[in-house]
Image (cartoon, rainbow, N blue to C red):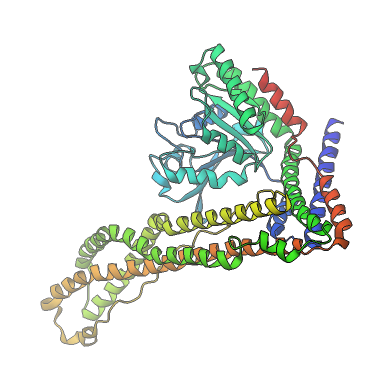
Amino acid sequence: MADTAENHSSDMTLESCRDLLGKVEDACRKFDIISLRRSIEVSRGLLTERPVIDVAVLGQFKAGKSSFLNSIIGRPVLPVGVIPVTTVITRLQYGDKERAVVTTFDGSRWETGIEGLEEFISEARNPANEKNVEAVDIDLPSLRPYVGLRVVDTPGLGSAFTYNTETSREWLPRVGTAIVAISADRPLAESDIDLIRNLMGHTPKVVLLLTKADLLSEGERKEVMQFFKTTLKRVLGLELPMFMYSTTRETDAFKRKIDHVLLGLSRHRDLEFQNILEYKVGALAKGCAGYLEIALRTATEANVDRRNLRELIINEKVEYEAIEPELSLMARENMLQTRTIIAARLEMIRSGFTTRLVQRLTGALPSWKGNLWQLTRTYEEWLEQNLVREVEAISEEEHIHFFGTLKKTRESISRSLELFRHYLNSNITKVLGVTLEKTDWKMEVTEPSHAHVVFIKTFDFHLDLVWFMIPMFIFRKAFERHFLKKIPRIAEIHLSRLAYQWEVRINDVIEEMKVQALRHVREELSTIESLLSESPDRTEEILCALDGLRAGPDIRKGTDASRHHGNDSDRQ
């Protein structure tokens, strides 16, 4: 009977989310709020899915995240060490057989043994993720109690390795439930506060895990817990569940308490997923309500000078004509630097590349037989095989270093979008007294595809047409020296072609970033202009739409399960 009641509750939650999302869609359609279109599509997609819940373990480097997960698993699957260790996202979930699957940025996937994971996920064996691993997925039979969950180990924030920090931050939007690991032997830092604040925009459930509790006495533990609780209440206005943990002392007792959270998530996975969905749809409804408030303020002012209103809100700082040249200039300047960055990186490896080709050719030449025509054909076939293999290997190994302008463009455009949104919101608040919710304007871009290396004959041997006139026992050594002498120039040409191919691919992505950013700006301005033109005869329609949105779920409330976990933590 209990299961039936739980399923009924989940169905009701799903139905209320569908209803609220339908009201958001209806309001956006009626009042031309096109800037929320992407968020609506994401929420609509979630309504049709039943994915696993990602439980991400996040925090500053050396907070003990991997050690904690090894303790939960019951064996040392993840590498730990005295320096920042984890370099890629590592996801663990229940599987009926033990296995690990490595996925790289180019979409390649292969299975590997658990014992060889350090090759891919540790900073020591895969520095700055030079092997271009996107994620490692681990299936373990021992995680059966947590079926329906996927526990995620993330690179440390604030690591000396910039790549690690970027990887964790890029992954934040995918978090369903977050465990923030903070070492109990250090104070709550501003970076921890920022992380928690950021997470609250993505998930309704954030749990604090105070690691290394063995370093504190019982009295000190209570003091630290109270300090953290007071600080979070004062700075963020939040009360979050908090748990102590140690992998060296009292581990079983600590584990039972955090297990209560994880097992609760697993047993009530459907309900927890509905809670996450409700949170996201509720936030979307709140954003839509903010836009409708603009329309309401405009419509209820019968004598409002709409032209003047528009000029006050959409001023010279937020006009499309002002931001379009700025973003275009950013993209163009970075595009001009792309080739330089790639060429500089390839120049560093050109000498080694040339030396390897010369050494291989020197070793291969003595085994080649035949006249000049046959020797030339063998040489060309050898070049094609070796050049394609070598250049593709270079592309695979080095391409992560080609993305400098890509990252720089993304950061610059993101800052410009934030500034645009800040000025626009400030104007709206000042003129209309309405504060809009923060919009997630993440640019979705795909990593450039790998360059496809095709061998092109670099020169023609006209002499091989008269091969029957050339005695090879006299001239063979001369032709071998000629073949070897050509290698440096051939290597240079093919590296140059590789640089060009990557330049085109990267600059295409930069252009797509600019296009997406300008689309965000156009849609936002179009939405605001449409709302500013609403007439008094639509006041009742706007009020009706607002009432429908406000009747939806309160996104600041968690599920009963969430509050239950919080009470458990208070008893520690």
Quick one: 434 or 543, which is closer to the camera?
Answer: 434
Relative to 530, is 71 above or below?
A: above
Residue 383 visible from this viewpoint: yes
Identified at 28% across, 57% down, the residue is 348
Q: Quadrant of residue 498?
A: bottom left
Relative to 240, is 34 above or below?
A: below
In the figure, is residue 484 to the left or right of 55? left
Residue 248 locus on image (x, y percent): 49, 19
Residue 391 locus on image (x, y percent): 35, 63
Relative to 49, is 380 above or below?
A: below
In the figure, is residue 538 to the left or right of 60? right
Which quarter shows the N terminus?
top right
In the figure, is residue 457 to the left or right of 236? left
Identified at 43% across, 36% down, the residue is 85
Residue 70 locus on image (x, y percent): 52, 29
Quick one: 226 or 308, which is closer to the camera?
Answer: 308
